[in-house]
Amino acid sequence: MTTAKVLYIYTAPTAGAKLEDRDSVTAVPGQGLEGDRYATLQGNYSEETMTPDREVTLIEAETIEALRDERGIDLHPSQTRRNIVTRGIALNDLVGAEFRVGEVAMRGIRLCEPCAYLQDLLGIEGLVKVLVKRGGLRAQILSEGTIRIGDLISE
């Protein structure tokens, strides 16, 4: 059995800004990850108030590796523009489910389907098509706490 864990954590201060690699980040219910563009309503798709599906995004390292192996698309994990890169868990299965990332409780809200914004930003033709149903998970933060690299993920 594979242990599910956090490999990378990223935040960006504003829409389109380069994602910053973090060793840890504070997750705040109703706000998102401290220092991230969506927590401060500076994201590309921010509204006047935070919505639960914008609080945190996750993607599987296995998806990033499959893009490279199957399609020759070599992305650095930060280029996916997701907050947390995981290994060892099927994120699609967490839609509607509660789970933990280290000490933080979350609920999977919906799949994080790819968009033309990411494709255009990276200049990779066809990226939207190959990421359908593999673009990650949008989740709501249910309890405040710190998420760290190496934290276990459990259902």
Image: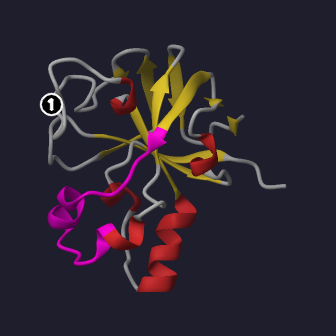
**Measured from the top left, where is residue 73 in percent x and y?**
37, 79
| Label 1 environment density (alpha carbons within 10 Å; few <14, some 14–19, many ≥20) | some
Whether residue 31 appears in magenta in the rendering, the answer is: no
Task: Say which residue appears at 69% left-offset and 47% top-offset.
Answer: 4
Specify the color scheme: secondary structure
Is residue 119 left or right of 93 when viewed as pictured? left
Rendered location of residue 77, percent (x, y) = 40, 59
Q: Who's the residue at 36% across and 70% down the image?
A: 75
Residue 124 highlighted magenta (yes or no): yes
Range of residues picked out in magenta: 110-128
| Quarter occupied by residue 119 | bottom left
Task: Locate residue 37 relative to residue 30 in the image: left or right.
Answer: left
Q: Is residue 33 visible?
A: no
Tell me the residue at 54%/14% (across/down): 143
- Residue, far right: 1
Residue at the spot of label 1: 42
Q: Amino acid at mark 1?
A: Gln
Which SS class for mark 1?
A: loop
